[in-house]
Amino acid sequence: MSEQAEKFGFTLKATDGMARRGRLTTAWGAVETPVFMPVGTAATVKGMMPDSVKSTGASIILANTYHLMLRPGAERVARLGGVRKMMGWDGPLLTDSGGFQVMSLGPLRKLDEDGVTFKSHLDGSKHRLTPERSTEIQHLLDATITMAFDECTPFPATKPVAAESMALSMRWAKRSRSAFQARTGYGQFGIVQGSVFPDLRAESVAALEEIDFEGYAVGGLAVGEGQQAMFETLEVTTPLMRQDKPRYLMGVGKPSDLVGGVARGIDMFDCVLPTRSGRTGQGFTRRGPVNLKNARHADDPRPLDEACGCPACSRYSRAYLHHLFKAEEVLSLMLLSWHNLHYYQDLMADMRIAIEAGSFADYEANFHAMQAMGDIEPL
Amino acid sequence: MSEQAEKFGFTLKATDGMARRGRLTTAWGAVETPVFMPVGTAATVKGMMPDSVKSTGASIILANTYHLMLRPGAERVARLGGVRKMMGWDGPLLTDSGGFQVMSLGPLRKLDEDGVTFKSHLDGSKHRLTPERSTEIQHLLDATITMAFDECTPFPATKPVAAESMALSMRWAKRSRSAFQARTGYGQFGIVQGSVFPDLRAESVAALEEIDFEGYAVGGLAVGEGQQAMFETLEVTTPLMRQDKPRYLMGVGKPSDLVGGVARGIDMFDCVLPTRSGRTGQGFTRRGPVNLKNARHADDPRPLDEACGCPACSRYSRAYLHHLFKAEEVLSLMLLSWHNLHYYQDLMADMRIAIEAGSFADYEANFHAMQAMGDIEPL
C-alpha cells in the first residue's frame, strides 16, 4: 500500500436518467464507473497476462473465494502477499464471498443457521464457510472489496422460501460486517436478495443500509429468471438504493445486460462470459456475436470487428482466427479472450461517455440497432 | 518486402575451435548465429503472441509444411499473404519440407522414387508430397528459408538401407533445387543424410555441394541415436561442410545438445522442446530442469530462475506457477513456454558472446558445472 493510501469512496460525477457516471477510489487505484470487472477465478484471468488485461482498459478484477480457499488455500495466498501480489495485478481486486459457488454445489452442501458445510469439487474434502470465515478468507486474499457472505436464493423460489432465504442473508450480512477488518482504502459490500419480489427487495435494501456498507450489490439475479425479469427487479430495487454508494450487479452479463443494467442504475458488473466465450470461439462485436469456428470465416481476410483496436482485430484476419480454433491452438483462446475483454471495456467506456454527454438514451438505441444488424457478410 | 530487399547471405564473424559466430541476412531481417529457432508448427508458436516470441530474443522461427498443407492449406495461406503475414511474424521464417513428419506417419505413408503418398492424421484424406510439390508449398507459405524434400532415414538403419535412403534424398535434393523459385533475400537449404555412417555423410555433403544451396542442414539426427552418437556424427560431418554457408542441425534439442552442437560447428537449431516442456510443467534453468508440478514448489516465493529476465521469473513465484499448473490454468503454459524460450535465447546469446571472446571452452565447462549443481533447495 502507498504510504498515504487513498480512502475508499464513491463520487457520483453525472447522471442521465437512472444511468450513473461515477468514480470509485480505493487503496490500489481508482475505478471509473460504470465498470466491467474481468473474472480471475483462480487468481488468473484465463488465458491473459495481467498487463494484457490492463491494456484492454480493465481497472479492477474479481477473484473467487471458493476456488482460492480450496486451491492454493487462503493462508498460502496470504503468505504470498495476497491475490493481487501473487498474480501480479496492480489494481484493485474484488472477491466474492464463496456463497454463490457453494450454493451451486447442490447435494454436496448442507446449510444451517451458522453457515454452510460442503465438499470440495476437487477432491471431496469437507469444508465450512460461515460469514466470519468467508470474511476472514477475503482478508487473507487481500481483497480490496470484500463481499458479505450470503445465500444466493435459487430461482424460481416461492415467496416464503425467498423471504426466509433473504432474512438469513441479512443476518449473515450483519455477521459479515462485524467480522470485517477495516483498512484504509478497502471496503465491504452488502448484497441485496429477495428474488423477484419487490417488497422483499425493499426489505433487504433497508436491512443492509441499516448495517451500513461501503457499497451494495444486487444478488440473486442472472440465475435463470431471464433478462426481462432481471430488468424488472432492478427497476424496483435500484431506486431504493443509496445514491452515494456504488451498486454492483453480480455475475452479469451479456452486452445487452450491461447496457440495460447501466440504464437501470447499476455501476459495476462482472461475468465470465467474455473469457468463457473466448475459449469456445464466440466473439462479441459491435454487430452482435460471431462464431469464429464457422466455416464461412475460413478465407475471410477481414478483422473480427473492424472498429476494435485489440491485437486480435488489429493484427489478424478472421481466416487466421478460424484456423487457430480449428487447430485447437492455445493462441485462439488467448486472442479471442483478449478481444472479448477489450470489447467489453470499449462498451463500458462508450457508456461512460454517453452518460457524461447526457445522451445515454441515444447510445442505447444505437447499440441495439447495431447489434440487430448482425455480422458482416462473408466476402 | 522492402524495396531494396537484403540479399540472402551468411558472414562468418568469428570462430573459436569449431564453434562459429556468424550473421545470416535475409529479405526479412538478419539473424545472429548460433541461433535457436522456436517452432510454430501450425503458424503459431504454441501459447505465445508473436511479439512475445520476439521479446525473448528470437529472430527467426520455423513452421511445418506437413501441418500447414493439411490445415489451413497452402493455397489458402498464400491467399492470406503467407505464413509470416498471416500470423503476424515480421522476421524471417524457415519451413521444413514435410518429409520428417510424413516419415513419422509409418503405415499411413507409402514411398516411391517420385515421392510419398500419405493419409492425413486429421481426417484420413490422401495426399502426396514430391520434391516439386514440397518446394511449391514452401513457396506458397512464403518461407524465407525453404528446405529440400528428403527422406529422414530411420534409426537404426543398416548401412545398405542408409546408403539407399541417402541416395534417394540426394536425387530429391536435386529436384527440390530445380523446383525452387529464387527470390532476393530468400534461400534454400539442402539436407545431409547418411545416418551414423561417416562415409555416407561425406558422400551426402559432396552431393549437396555439387547442387549448391544457400545453406546446409544435418538431418537424420535426434531420432533415437543418443547424444553421443549425434555428436560423433557431427564431428565427422561438419568439418567437411563449407565454411561460408550456414549449418543447421534439425530438430535439436536439449540445452546440452545446443551447446555440444555449437561446439561442433552448428549455426542453427530448432526444437519443440521449450514450448512442449512449457506445457507439461518442465522449466529449463541455469541449474538444470525443474518440474513445477512438484509439491516442493507450493510455498516457494522465489522465482523459477533468479538470473532470468522473462515475465515468469521477474514477476512470479514458483508457488504461483505451481498453483497455475495444479489448477490447469492456460496461463501456466503461457508463462512457462515464455520462460523456456527466453532461457533458450539467453543460452544462444551467451554462446555468441563466448565465441566472440574466444572463451567458448570455458563457457562450455561452466555451463555443464552449473547444470550439474541441480535446482536450488526448497526454503
Image (spheres, coloured by chain):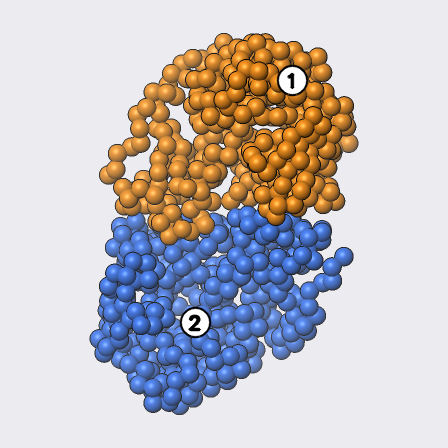
Chain colours: A orange, B blue
Answer with the quarter of the image where residue A311 lies. Answer: top left
Q: How many marks?
A: 2
| Residue assigned mark 2 | B250
Give percent across and percent down for residue A34.
54, 21
Which residue is located at x 38 percent, y 73 percent? B215
Q: Where is residue A181 in the image (x, y as percent from the top left)?
A: 77, 28
Image-quadrant location for residue B122:
bottom left
Q: Is B275 left or right of A43, judged from the image as shown? A: left
Label 1 resides on the chain identified as A
Residue tagged 1: A167
Q: In the image, which is nearer the foreground, mark 2 or mark 1?
A: 1
Task: Using residue A179 as the reference point, say whether residue A68 is left or right of it.
Answer: left
Local secondary structure at mark 2: loop
- Per the model, the C-alpha gap separating discs 2 and 1 is 69 Å
In depth, the one of B205 and B343 nearer the eye is: B343
Q: Which of the chains bears the disc numbered 2?
A: B
Position in image of residue B279 (x %, y %) = 52, 57
User: Which residue is rendered at x = 56% and y = 69% of the image?
Assistant: B255
